[in-house]
Amino acid sequence: MITTTGLTKVYRSRGREVTALDGVDLHVREGEVYGVIGQSGAGKSSLIRCVNLLERPTSGTVTVAGQDLTALAGRGPRAGKELRQARSRIGMVFQHFNLLSSRTVQDNVELPLEILGKSGKERSRKALELLDLVGLADKAKAYPAQLSGGQKQRVGIARALAGDPKVLLSDEATSALDPETTRSILQLLRDLNRQLGLTVLLITHEMDVVKSICDSAALMENGRIVESGTVSELLATPGSQLASALFPVAGEATGDDRTVVDVTFHGEAATQPVISQLSRTYNIDISILGAAIDTVGGLQVGRMRIELPGRYEDNVVPIGFLREQGLQIDVVGQEPVLLVEGAK
Ligand SMILES: Nc1ncnc2c1ncn2[C@@H]1O[C@H](COP(=O)(O)OP(=O)(O)OP(=O)(O)O)[C@@H](O)[C@H]1O
Ligand SMILES: [Mg+2]
């Protein structure tokens, strides 16, 4: 649904150049919720603004629903007709809602329909239908100042859906909201994704957001995507930073001459019997430093951090035993072993 190839954005201001995007290849499949995470300044907003051509990329291409947007003329407010039309098929939700305070809720939602030249009757019907969809049917005549943050964001989402987009872009839509409101807005995005088959590309710096609603995720650093994949692919990638951020296990090694191993299992598989078998077979004392079970991207995942006596070299055989049991093994402090083809 969204593909970027070699996307580069260089800002030039006051004789200084900042490379915000440095060759980004992004692939978002139809119907998925795709999260982009990264630290401040990583290039997340630049990416989303280039995807809908609010910013013109310095080089590279952006294709949305099969249409090469970079081939269409104009940018920003000077976009040509074709680009404006293509963009009306891409909804955008902002952190600070960007509602017009002098217009009612309904008139805010109607705004994109006015730009598309729809009749008054059609606009009103569509706006009321969308306000109902986001649970704000009773607020049509209210003004933004009379709404809570969560309600304002629901208006922002209704407005973003006015042009019947296939794609919804969201730049930190929940970062101005409290945790409970965040959850309800994320749930709304998830519901819209399922009900309307809407593809959602969202930017966040909160791992919990990715954990609760994303099917896939990418990690950005310095204008590049350094890791990406479906949540289950990421969890199965040894050494994945996203996987360990999505699913951290605590526990420090208790001393030198110790090997610390993270054991990850999916679904119903249990590690406990395997760990006792390991201990008996090799006659070693295994300490459990930490363990957790969680639901990530709708999958149940368990992770256990264990400690074996001796250095890594002394534990190659027991570690091999664990791998043979089909468990995913990450030896802390060792280069990851590639188990997934194509994984980094
Ligand atoms: N209009 C601009 N002119 C000049 N530099 C810019 C402009 N917009 C962004 N930048 C720079 O590009 C880099 C990436 O910025 P961007 O806003 O994409 O980051 P971000 O990942 O969204 O960060 P945040 O999490 O803080 O929102 C930063 O170094 C930023 O200072
Ligand atoms: Mg940003």
Image (spheres, rainbow, N blue to C red):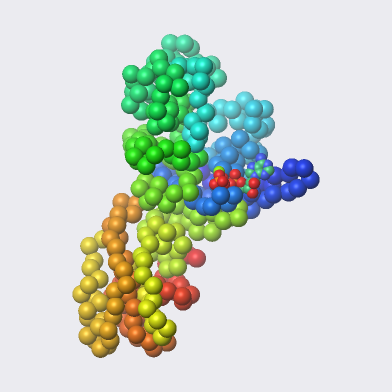
Residue 317 horizontal/vertical position (percent): 35, 86
Residue 32 horizontal/vertical position (percent): 40, 45
**Residue at 56% across, 27% down:** 85
Tell which residue pokes out farthest to the right in this image: 15
The answer to whether residue 218 is above or below residue 257 is above
**Residue at 32% across, 75% down:** 306
**Residue at 42% across, 37% down:** 177
Say whether residue 221 is left or right of residue 19. left
Q: In which quarter of the image is residue 275?
A: bottom left
Say whether residue 222 is left or right of residue 250. right
**Residue 148 in sight here:** yes
Residue 140 horizontal/vertical position (percent): 39, 17
**Residue 60 in sight here:** no
Quadrant of the picture in which ligand 2 is shown = top right
Q: Quadrant of residue 156?
A: top left
The answer to whether residue 184 is above or below residue 112 is below
